[in-house]
Amino acid sequence: MATDPGRRVIVTVDGPAGSGKSTLAKRLARRADLQYLESGAFYRAAAWLATRAEADLTDPEWLAALLAANPLQVKPKKHGFYLAVAGRDLTQDLRLPQISHNASVVAQLRPVRQWVLSHLRALGATGGLVAEGRDMGSRVFPEAEVKIYLDASLAERAHRRWLELQAQGNDISEDQVRRDLAQRDRRDQERQEDPLLVPEGAHVLDSTRSDPEQMEEICFRLIQPYL
């Protein structure tokens, strides 16, 4: 996709689950007065539709037809977007554990990835984004002015995710969370369609021993020249 010289800056933040990329991207979007765009929400929207329809999560043709028959409405809000289907706001539904799990399954399928890609690129046409996901800098916005790849140790990522799940009232052991993350890492890295990798030209950062404020300061200095 060619870069439009008239568009605003695009910042991409990629990395594995639990690395802190969502927190970082949201903080950068607020501080830089940019829109926060989360690719995971679109995969969860696809998973929500599939789960509600009791679809086969591994059937690409069925899922392609399902997505085509249920247009996604994307509504801007301050520093982000609402997703809705047939007027129903999906904000709360997309955070359900089953939807998150199913999203990592359907995200492996080409029709789902193409559906998400078309939405993301349309929203990025004029720039002004901090785009967070697993292939934002490598596939969705390879022309982004600033690319960040955020990583952390598996143990630290599992601990962070376990704390989040505990706060949400989910009864699950930290060891199980670690196993689930390791499995998800393998799916993300080994899938044929747009695997998780370090984008060309990305700034690779490790958040294992850094707090959100420190990571924000480091990354804001990277994007400040483009604001």
Image (cartoon, rainbow, N blue to C red):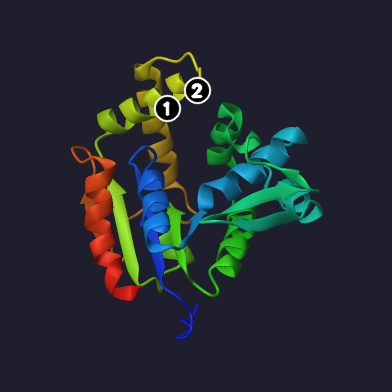
Query: Could you tell me which residue is drawn at 50 percent across and 18 percent down?
Result: 170
Q: Amino acid at mark 2?
A: Gln
> Would you call the spot at circle 1 few (<14 residues within 10 Å), some (14-19), or many (20 or more)?
few
Q: Which mark, by number, is residue 122?
A: none
Residue 6 screen position, x and y as percent: 48, 85
Q: Amino acid at mark 1?
A: Glu
Residue 60 screen position, x and y as percent: 67, 48
Total numbered circles: 2
Secondary structure type for disc 1? helix
Task: Please tell me which residue lies in front, 202 or 145.
Answer: 145
Q: Is residue 28 visible?
A: yes
Q: Are marks 2 and 1 in contact (CB under 8 Å)?
A: yes
Query: Could you tell me which residue is drawn at 52 percent across and 47 percent down?
Result: 40
Query: Could you tell me which residue is drawn at 50 percent across and 23 percent down?
Result: 168
Query: Could you tell me which residue is drawn at 72 percent across and 41 percent down?
Result: 49
Task: Please tell me which residue lies in front, 30 or 112.
Answer: 30
Task: Please tell me which residue lies in front, 153 or 60.
Answer: 153
Residue 53 screen position, x and y as percent: 78, 36
Q: Return the residue at label 1.
A: 164
The quarter holding residue 141 reads bottom left
Can you name the residue that lies furthest to the bottom here?
5
Q: Return the residue at label 2.
A: 168
Residue 227 screen position, x and y as percent: 35, 73
Secondary structure type for disc 2? loop
Q: Is residue 117 left or right of residue 191?
A: right
Q: CA distance from mark 2 to mark 1?
A: 6 Å
Q: Is residue 135 visible?
A: no
> Would you call the spot at circle 2 few (<14 residues within 10 Å), some (14-19), or many (20 or more)?
few
